[in-house]
Image (cartoon, rainbow, N blue to C red):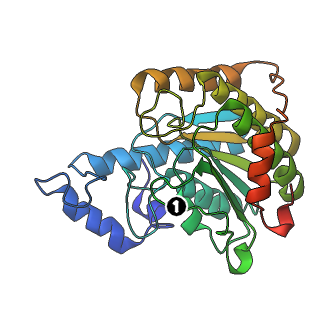
Amino acid sequence: MAVTDEIESLHSSFYVNQLRGHALRTDPFSYDRDTYLMEETLPTAELAVGGCLELADKIMAEEINYGFALIRPPGHHAEPGRGMGFCVFNNVALTAKYLLDTYKLRRILIVDFDIHHGNGTQEAFYDSDQVMFLSLHQSSLFPFTGKESETGEEDGRGYTINVPVFSQFGDPEYTYLLGRLLQNLVEQYQPQVILVSAGYDGHIDESISSTLLSTKWFGVATAMLRQAAREVCDNKLLFILEGGYNPVSLEASILETFNSLITKEIPQTGIFPVKRAEKLLAQHPLREFWSI
């Protein structure tokens, strides 16, 4: 279980105390209609963060290569000063902060393929060059942030890369985009560890989104991330569960990720030369630092 100091390395003490007060109220929706709080919520959220930090320790100690934090509640919408979108503490951002503080890392890549933009993660490192944040998410969807023009500020200028995609995009487009982005960003940034906000709500069977990702795509994405981690950071790769609301497709997609992680040889994924994806890249140019 994460302790208060670890959580307050990112989240304000005012916010944490505010959560404690709301968790004791009889109305679970007293804080936010999308972020319900009960007496058990904070201990559960602290356990979730603690599990992520323990996995990070094991990866840094080279006891394991890859980790997957199968946790709830999710976290990537939680900003330093407020929770939202079912998220209480930002698990992936807290893990990155822990790695920066404890292991003195200076280059962490966070890849977020949840269908919703990880606004909280972006805010946490928007002015930092020590964490690069890459998000592929459906355009014009909650929380309505993550425009391609949001690229960071001060030291972090150019280290936030948002790729809002069109609805009806599916496996070929996502594979092309993720492949091109990983290839270029990993080569230029040389991350020391890769963290993944693994959201499965872009699945074709999810009613919350309009993208068309298959179960198999999540295994393909995992293989691509494994390849990147092997090339630049000695296989240091940690997945943290985010969204996913159809229990059937969520279970199948997570298992596809597991199978791809434990396969001895990294599967060959290939890159699809999809014209629609190329057009998307042209319409959403990234910072000149990270030309793709």
Residue 285 place in picture, x, y as percent: 78, 62
What SS does tag 1 mark? helix
- Res. 263 image quadrant: top right
Q: Is residue 246 left or right of residue 145?
A: left
Mark 1 lies on residue: 119
Q: Nearer the viewer, residue 129 or 174?
A: 174
Q: Residue at x 37, y 48 (%)?
A: 45
Going by the numbered disc 1, the residue's amino acid type is Asn
Side of 133 relative to 253 (left or right): right
Does residue 23 appear to the left or right of 250 in the view shown? left
Which residue is at 80% across, 56% downward? 282
Nearest the eye: 112 or 163:
163
Say whether residue 233 is visible. Answer: no
Q: Is residue 130 above or below residue 249?
A: below
- Does residue 153 sit above or below 38 in this rendering? below
- Look at the picture and state if 151 lies above or below 187: below
Q: Is residue 147 visible?
A: yes
Which quarter of the figure is the C terminus placed in? bottom right
| Drawn side of residue 47 relative to residue 291, left or right | left
- State the image coordinates of residue 259 (x, y, percent, origin top left): 65, 19
Residue 96, how many percent across, how many down?
62, 56
Local packing at callout 1 (Cα closer than 10 Å; few below 14, some 14-19, many 20+) is some
Residue 8 occupies quadrant: bottom left
